[in-house]
Amino acid sequence: MSEREAARYLSIGTTTLRSQGPAPKRLGRRVLYDLRDLDRWADSLSGQPLTEPAQEAEAAEVERRFLEELAQRA
């Protein structure tokens, strides 16, 4: 999502998002934020960071979805 949408989603300003939020992704000149990154960042503010096994499980799930999407496109 765009920077403005991400800031609205988190109910913070774009300046706060840029200076303190998660790192954005870049697509050409566009600055985009992943919803999962925003959720993880917000959770970490309240002391709920993912444990190592949970991080690995989430990464495996993201990879599975990505590969599934690629297979559907082919």
Image (cartoon, helix red, strand yellow):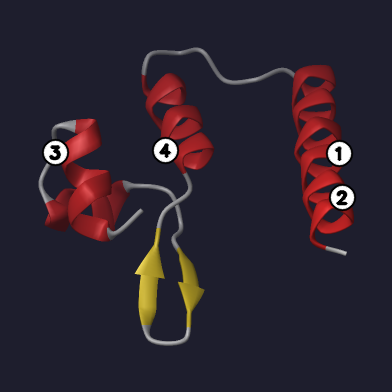
Q: In the rendered view, does 8 fall on the left or right side of 68?
A: left
Query: What residue does disc 3 label?
Result: 12
Q: Give above or below for 48 relative to 1.
A: above
Residue that badge 1 annotates: 64
- SS of the residue at dot 2? helix
Q: Between residues 28 and 56, which one lies in front from this camera angle?
A: 28
Q: Which residue is mark 4?
A: 38
Residue neighbourhood size for the residue with mark 4, other residues' Cα within 10 Å, grouped as few (<14), some (14–19), many (≥20): many
Q: Measuring from the top left, give residue 48's x and y in whole percent.
A: 51, 13
Point out the frontmost of discs 1 and 3. 1
- Circles 1 and 2, Cβ within 8 Å, touching? The answer is yes
Q: CA distance from mark 1 to mark 4?
A: 20 Å
Separation of residues labelled 2 and 4 (CA atoms): 22 Å
Q: Is residue 39 above or below residue 72?
A: above
Q: Amino acid at mark 3?
A: Ile
Mark 1 or mark 3: name the one nearer the start of the chain: 3
Question: Which mark is on residue 67?
Answer: 2
**Of the residues under marks 2 and 3, which one precedes in the sequence?**
3
Identify which residue is drawn at 38% across, 14% down: 46
* Rendering coords of residue 15 (x, y %): 14, 57
Secondary structure type for disc 3: loop
Distance between mark 1 and mark 2 Cα atoms: 5 Å
Residue at point 86%, 39% (across, down): 64
